Amino acid sequence: MRPNDRTQAGATTVEFALTGTVLLMLVFGTLELGRLFLAWNSAQEVTRRAARDAAVLGFYALPYARNDAVLHPEAAGDSAAFPALGEITAATVSIRFMSGPYGALMPAGTLPASAAQNQWNCSQGLSPCITAVQATLCQPGSDPCQPLRYLPVGIPGLPLTLFLPLSPATVPLEGAGAASG
């Protein structure tokens, strides 16, 4: 063994430790960025599904619409979570009803008694008349709606605070007695 080899004995291990750390951070960062895009697109899809279900099935089927939006229509309550994204649950799906030609949000507790009553109200120009449904993703219990915090899992300890978009989706009412046309 040459004298110069003994002084270089651990150099390769140290170099790998330094470059391997950077490489692993890049790999995990790329995976986390992909998961963030999944969460962003899933937020859009969840609100679209919830608004569509509520528009077609009516205001009496809101629990089903919330659970179906997170891909668990058979679940009971608001505990169902979107697969691979625990941030998005049935409890985070907020469904509001809109009235009038400009889609003003209706105050809570002012819904018509039935789909037939809603159709009558709309045909006679009376209030309340539901014309559209809006779904958003909000922190449970927040009013006004606050965005959901994204929880990164790929890089533990990273001081990163990101929020998912509210992703409002508005759909014209179809099944709860709205007058068409």
Image (cartoon, rainbow, N blue to C red):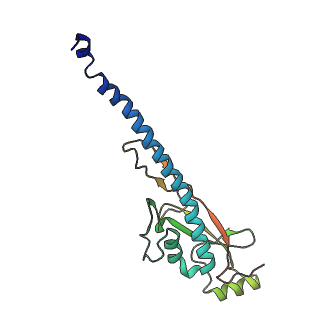
Q: Which of the 4 image quadrants contains residue 108?
A: bottom right
Left or right placement of residue 89 versus residue 135 in this view:
left
Drawn side of residue 62 relative to residue 16, left or right:
right
The image quadrant where one finds the N terminus is top left
Pinpoint residue 146: horizontal percent, then vertical percent. Answer: 52, 57
Residue 52 position within the rendered picture, expressed as x and y whole percent measured from the top left: 62, 72
- Outermost front residue: 1
- In percent of width and height, residue 178 lies at 70, 81
Q: Is residue 63 above or below residue 150?
A: below
Report the front residue among 45 and 170: 45
Residue at image point 49% right, 56% down: 148
Task: Give the residue at x 49% y 48%.
Answer: 162
Which residue ends up furthest to the top in the rendered image? 3
Task: Indicate the quadrant containing the C terminus: top left, top right, bottom left or bottom right.
Answer: bottom right
Would residue 134 appear left or right of 14 to someone viewing this image?
right
Question: Which quadrant of the structure image shows residue 84?
Answer: bottom left
The residue that appears at 27% across and 17% down in the rendered structure is 8
Q: Left or right of 32: which side holds 109?
A: right
Residue 118: % across, % down = 67, 84
